Amino acid sequence: MGDFFRRFSEKVLFVYNLFQKKRIFCLVYRLNDLKMRLKKHTVMVFGLIMILNISCYQEEEPENGGRVMGYKPVYASYETIAKVSFMDGRPMKSPGKIYVMGSYLFVVEQNSGIHVINNQDQRNPKPEKFINIPGIVDLAVKNRVLYADNGPDLVAIDISNPSDLKILKRLEKVLPYPEYPPYENVKFECVDPAKGYVIGWDYVELDNPKCFR
């Protein structure tokens, strides 16, 4: 009787273990199947989202038919730019860099020239001369020789005697062509070197400008 129960118990345990393995196998199979289904649905949902995003995306049309405020280049011929001359003093409109030499001030007028001002009486400065230099932005002085950008050229002027200025030398085409305005995060009309040299920028309404900086 004892052997019978022992063998019976072993068979029951074998069947139980087999049943458990089958259950585990079925459970693993179902989990894998569920995992594959989830992957398929995830791919489908992700693809659907992408399709919806693409189909719903639309660029905003610019207001006023593409007309915006921006900068338009002001051109001058290379022949006009190269004509540096000395003129009578004039009022300042857009002053820039200042160089002090004794009682004289040399003040850059952006894109136009340099004011020569007698500042001996600081309460009453007198503009004595204006050096016409189209396209100027900056100046430098060494040994009483003033160097100024003149479009693509560099001009050297003797300022040792402010009452008798003299052009000493011109270095041609040593400076880069201005391809954008001196501002950032702005739209502007793309430059065209065939139209001349850019000596300034006007802030105006532009029709769908293609350039941005």
Image (cartoon, grey):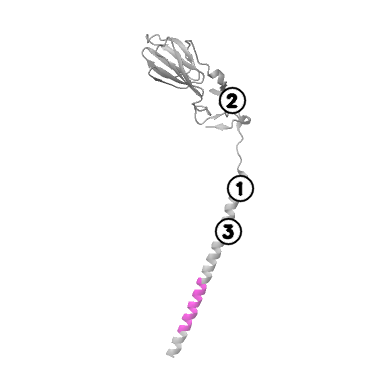
User: How much space separates mark 2 and mark 1, taking CA atoms?
Assistant: 37 Å
Q: Amino acid at mark 1?
A: Leu
Residue 35 picture quarter: bottom right
Residue 126 picture quarter: top left
- Which residue is depicted at the point 59% across and 49% down? 50
- Which residue is depicted at the point 63% across and 30% down? 65
Determine whether the residue tagged by mark 3 lies in a helix, strand or loop: helix
Mark 3 crowdedness (10 Å alpha carbons): few <14, some 14-19, many ≥20? few
Q: Amino acid at mark 2?
A: Glu
Pick whichever, 173 or 80, lies toward us: 173
Q: Give the mark nearest the N terminus, 1 or 3.
A: 3
Region of the chain picked out in magenta, as a range:
9-24
Determine whether the residue tagged by mark 2 lies in a helix, strand or loop: strand
Q: Amino acid at mark 3?
A: Lys
CB-based contact (under 8 Å), mark 3 and mark 2: no
Q: Is residue 67 left or right of residue 138?
A: right
Mark 2 crowdedness (10 Å alpha carbons): few <14, some 14-19, many ≥20? some
> What residue would you read off at disc 3?
40
Dominant secondary structure, magenta: helix
Q: Nearer the viewer, mark 3 or mark 2?
A: 2
Determine whether the residue tagged by mark 1 lies in a helix, strand or loop: helix
> What residue would you read off at disc 1?
52
> What residue would you read off at disc 2?
205
Q: Give the mark nearest the N terminus, 2 or 1.
A: 1
User: How much space separates mark 3 and mark 2, taking CA atoms?
Assistant: 53 Å
- Which residue is depicted at the point 55% across and 18% down? 80
Q: In the image, is residue 85 above or below residue 171? A: above
